[in-house]
Image (cartoon, rainbow, N blue to C red):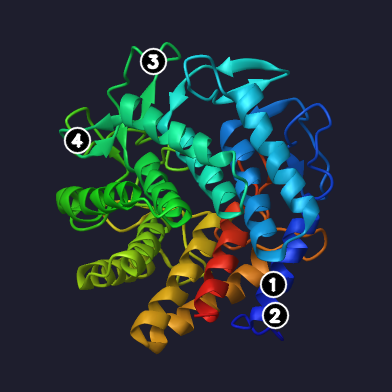
Amino acid sequence: MSYPNFESPAFLESHIRDTLAFYAPRIYAPEGGFYGCFLDDGTCYDPQSRHLVASARYVLNYATAYRLYGKPKHLKWAEWGLDYLQIAHRQDNGHYAWLIEDRIITDKRVMAYGHAFVLLAAASCVKAGIERATQIMADLYDFVETYFWDETAGAYFDERDNTLRTLSPYRGQNANMHMCEALLVAHQASGDAKYLDRAEQLAEKFAFDLAAQSGGQIWEHYDANWNVDMNFNIDKPNDRYKPWGFQPGHQTEWAKLLLILNEARPKRKWVERAKSLYDKAMETGWDKEHGGIAYGVAPDGRFCASEKYFWVQSESFATAWRLYHITGDETYRIDYNRIWKWSWDHMIDHAFGAWFRVRGSDGAAVDNKKSPLGKTDYHTMGACWDVLSICKN
């Protein structure tokens, strides 16, 4: 089969345009915010639901598109989505509602994971020149510091109830990883070192301190005292937000964040740790029979979730390219291209556009829901934008 030149900026820009075209204009909701829940052909199968993660990620997508391409429609949509976050999701006590269905809040949990994406969305708007997002970003930071920051542990709690008084005993890496991502972008947007300081603290905590409890890889779940919890969700290796097992995609995503951190505050240990996390993820997660990177790997090395998810592939190729750029090691360039080739063959919808959310271990379809609640292709376009940022340096 003939493949595009996956290293070409022209290819990456074209792929981003094609992905944006899948979502526009069908996502625009005249009553407020954006629709989610799309079948493979773009049909919206649930126009009533609004998930905080999707609402925030759409804002990120369009703020970034406006910053890079300068099209007024992208600015309009970024502001439209930012308004919806403030009007519909934000509540009187300062938290943002996790799930709204038919204009009613149906899941009242207050999630650090969701607030990380609101912070990321606001920071992306600041980078795009949307001035009113500056106060939103500052307020979000103050909120998560007040209600989620665990000063003793040096990490963020995961979940509270909607009164903000009751704290769940669960602790997790996923919310902290995306909080680290958001803090890095907030630092880029503002230049304020407090964001970078906190991002660095999270990187130290999860990539070094806590990873020492689990053989050097980053485990997903912890108890209230930040001890590794190997039993949490042991029967749910495919859970969307709290899966059991080592996640190769999260190892590579943390590696990418370490490399971004290294740009802002260079330390050799960030690069070395990024290499070790990525290398182990590819060693254990690459499917030697079918290709592609599996979703979950059990502590004994077997696949506990052999399906292939879109975000795992895209985050990993972005990290591979960053590692190639900083080390010059051709192994990472080879990885970049083999991940892209497998994704081109199996994960990308060449008929209707965008990426399929999940495929079977052999790359075959498992459902026809391309973008259920939460999926906006922020991972795939973000990975392409990240590679482009390296190409231009």
Q: Closer to us: mark 2 or mark 4?
A: 2
| Numbered circles on residues, count | 4
Q: What secondary structure is found at the residue carrying circle 1?
A: helix
- Report the amino acid beneath label 1: Glu
| Residue pictured at 48% horizontal, 21% vertical | 94
How much space separates mark 4 and mark 3, taking CA atoms?
A: 21 Å
The N terminus - image quarter? bottom right
Q: Estimate the x, y position of residue 335 in percent, counting from the top left.
A: 46, 78
Q: Say whether disc 3 or disc 1 marks the residue closer to the N-terminus.
A: 1
Residue 106, compared with residue 305, is above or below; it is above
Which numbered disc, 4 or 1, marks the residue closer to the eye? 1
Indicate which disc residue 378 carries. none
Q: Tell which of 266 and 294 is nearer to you.
A: 266
Residue occupying the far front of the picture? 131
* Residue beneath disc 1: 13
Q: Say which mark, if any, is on residue 226.
A: 4
Amino acid found under the numbered disc labelled 3: Leu
**Identity of the amino acid at label 2?**
Ala
Q: Which residue position holds label 3?
A: 164
